[in-house]
Image (tube, rainbow, N blue to C red):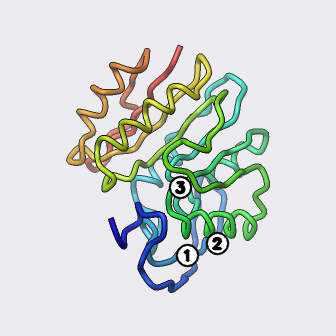
Amino acid sequence: MADHYYSNRPDAESAPAVIKHTGRGHHMTLETDRGVFSKSGVDFGSRLLIEAFEAPTIEGDFADIGCGYGPIGLSLAKDFPERQIHMVDVNERAVALAQKNAERNGVQNVRIDASDGMENVPSGLAAVITNPPIRAGKETIFKFYKEARERLVSGGDLWVVIQKKQGAPSTKEFLEGLYNEVDVVEKVKGYWILKAKKY
């Protein structure tokens, strides 16, 4: 898996760039780089997920799995200052960028770590949010969903964005076998936003 975003250490030579991003009405400046997902701008799926997300009414932290350089987690951290957002990625370059971007945008209610899946994510979460790394393969991604369920409290939600052509229907079916309630919150331009609730 050399030289793409789902690698611990991307081979691509570093060439940092800065982009502007607005999530949930919060304007941010984000540093990106080669070897991370969607380096030239926040992708449509992530933007859709950021805006569609609804916080559960229960208490608890959130987790952004596969956070990349941070657009989802930082947008939610800005919008929910009373919540701690755990942001993790297997890609060490992405993690370093997310840490820089949190600092650059004055976001303090985050914890950002390198993690293979949810290995370094605590339990007791109210919500898990992910734009999963499709290139990592179905086995890896389905493991995310299982690990998310284990770490969610009763009443907690998993939010996923996935394209129909990249397996949204089979993802929904898999989640229905794991969670108590699964809804398609939005379908836009081939992207599905799925919300899976654990009781």
Q: Tell me where residue 104 appears, x and y as whole percent.
A: 73, 70
Between label 2 and label 3, give the one nearer the viewer.
3
Q: Mark 1 points at which residue?
A: 19
Quadrant in which residue 30 is drawn: bottom right
C-alpha span from label 2 to label 1: 6 Å
Disc number at residue 43?
A: none
**Residue at image point 31% right, 56% down:** 135
Q: Tell me where residue 18 appears, x and y as whole percent.
A: 58, 79
Quadrant for the N terminus in the image: bottom left
Q: Nearer the viewer, residue 71 or 175?
A: 175
Q: In this view, does 17 lie above or below 60?
A: below
Q: Which amino acid does label 1 sit on?
A: Ile
Horizontal relation, residue 131 to residue 77: left or right: left
**Residue at image point 53% right, 55% down:** 89
Q: Mark 2 points at which residue?
A: 29
Q: Which amino acid does label 3 sit on?
A: Asp
Disc 2 element: strand
C-alpha span from label 1 to label 3: 20 Å
**Residue at image point 37% right, 42% down:** 141
Q: Tell me where residue 126 appears, x and y as whole percent.
A: 63, 29
Q: Name the residue under label 3.
A: 89
**Residue at image point 57% right, 59% down:** 71
Disc 3 element: strand
C-alpha span from label 2 to label 3: 20 Å
Q: Nearer the viewer, residue 120 or 184?
A: 120
Q: Residues within 10 Å of mark 1 (few under 14, many from 20)?
A: few
For marks 2 and 3, the one nearer the N-term is 2
